[in-house]
Amino acid sequence: MKRLLPFFFVVCTLILFLYPLWLPGFPYTHDGENHLARIANYALALRQGQIPPRWAPSFWAGYGYPVFNYNYPLANILAIPLLALKVSVELTMKVLITGAMALGTWALWTVLKKRTNGVAAAVGTIVWLSAPFTFTNVYVRGAIGEILAYATFISAIASLDIIGKKRGVWFTNIRF
């Protein structure tokens, strides 16, 4: 039980961090509404037969806009299965943010736990969760691409640690 206590604090911090996201409606952010529209238009473009989608068909009063040429596609691609199941765009965005934050938290916990003890791993993970930049990315900027990028980067490091542990690769023995 004593070994699970630091992880319990990390999970509680993650729940507190994500609680405002799950209130009714979608939080008003700088780019959140744009991302909701892009996700919906990405699915619409796929239904129209655009592979890969390049033209957002309902932007600019129905004339369209080539937003997908300049937009990061990972959030849109990950949203397609949920939208195919008739999940609303708002709920899809909330699920993507929650999943990315949970994945990033788990991956950071894994990396720190391997290199330190449980208390230090918990402190490091809680500091990452409560950092102003992380909070700002989710609740002020609404930058789903950056949230997914951080989760992917930390997960890649955790994956290298896990694979390296199984194969005995040299770079996993580096201590900070």
Image (cartoon, rainbow, N blue to C red):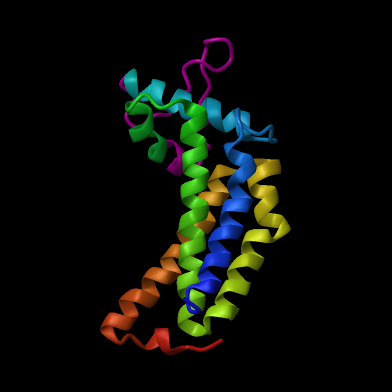
Dominant secondary structure of the magenta stretch? loop
Instruction: From this view, report whether residue 5 is shown above or below residue 142.
Output: below
Residue at screen point 57% across, 38% down: 22
Residue at screen point 33% across, 80% down: 164
Name the foreground residue: 171 vs 142: 142
Question: Does the magenta-highlighted stretch encompass residue 61?
Answer: yes
Q: Which residues are magenta?
A: 49-76
Residue at screen point 46% across, 76% down: 1
Question: Does the magenta-highlighted stretch encompass residue 134?
Answer: no
Q: Report the quarter where the C terminus lies.
A: bottom right
Where is residue 55? Give x, y as percent.
45, 24
Name the foreground residue: 129 vs 170: 129
Instruction: From this view, report whether residue 14 is shown above or below residue 156.
Output: above
Residue at screen point 39% across, 40% down: 78
Instruction: Residue lying at the far front in this picture: please name it.
Output: 1
Name the foreground residue: 112 vs 57: 112
Where is residue 92? Give x, y as percent.
46, 34
**Total count of labels:** 0
Instruction: Residue lying at the far left in this picture: please name it.
Output: 167
Where is residue 38? Give x, y as percent.
51, 28
Instruction: From this view, report whether residue 13 is shown above or below residue 19.
Output: below
Where is residue 4? Give x, y as percent.
48, 73
Instruction: From this view, report whether residue 49 is shown above or below residue 32.
Output: above
